[in-house]
Image (cartoon, helix red, strand yellow):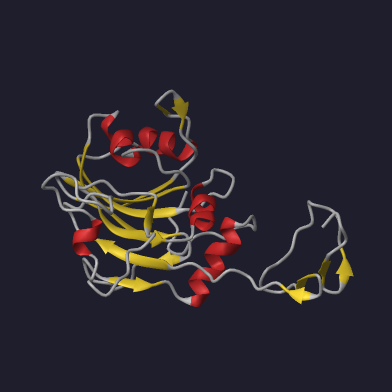
Amino acid sequence: MRDGKVRVNGQLVTSLSTNVDAAADKVEVDGRKVRGAKPGRLLVLNKPIGIVCSMKKQGKTLCLGDVLPANINTGRLFHVGRLDADSTGLLLLSDDGDLGHRILHPRNPVWKSYKVTVDGALTPEQLQAIRRGGLMLDGRPTLPARIQRKSGGSTKTHYQVQLREGRRRQIRRMFERWGLDVIGLHRFAFGPIQLGRLPSGGIRPATRGEMAELRNIAFGESQTTPRGGAKR
């Protein structure tokens, strides 16, 4: 660039901080067009219970590699975030390291939506504490969350919870601080991506529309309220 060999949309550029849109801008070096890198894969998996988030076997415990179809080239696939072994639902797999990093970066918060079944029930004050944020986990306050009670009986209560962060076993630990055990945790949405009717253990590629929406969020554009969003 400093030697004057780079043009963007026909215009000479010499600043190393120049931003380009690989999908829309024409970039040339010495008069030759530069082709953008091939988009990485983004797969949607409905993780079954009892599977650890690892592509490699860990002792006798089943891992992601054990549930992926044989026709899936695992190659450089990694899981974007994680679900603990006792949790089920939507898990993203990708070989696009930049996208995965940006999805999980605190500056690009992606709302993740869960169905949570609890042995017991939160009080109105405890619900408000989760919504307000500031609960101390690992020496840091939690961000404000969205939580709504969906139904409940004499012993079990069902909640919908949405988080913008993903700390280790965060939902379970938030309930445990009030002596409540989470007996079921299922993620059904990750930003604009919905699990829908994908069966347990099923996997599918993200659609072009889902990829576009997620990249808009990951690369700095604002996010709208998630679909099926819990009321504050």
Give the image location of residue 184, x and y in percent. Answer: 21, 49
Near-viewer residue (198 or 68): 68
Q: Quadrant of residue 190?
A: bottom left
Give the image location of residue 197, x and y in percent. Answer: 28, 73
Near-viewer residue (148 or 106): 106
Q: Is residue 51 above or below residue 36?
A: above
Near-viewer residue (103 or 3): 3
- Taking the spot 38% from the left edge, 33% from the top edge, the residue there is 125
Q: Is residue 34 left or right of residue 114?
A: right
Give the image location of residue 192, x and y in percent. Answer: 48, 65
- Taking the spot 39% from the left edge, 59% from the top edge, the residue there is 76
Q: Is residue 173 above or below residue 192?
A: above
Q: Residue furthest left?
A: 60
Near-viewer residue (127 or 229): 229
Q: Quadrant of residue 166?
A: top left
- Taking the spot 20% from the left edge, 39% from the top edge, the residue there is 120
Number of numbered discs visible in the structure rendering: 0
Q: Is residue 161 above or below residue 173?
A: below
- Taking the spot 10% from the left edge, 47% from the top edge, the residue there is 60
Give the image location of residue 181, x and y in percent. Answer: 20, 37
Quadrant placement of the N terminus = bottom right
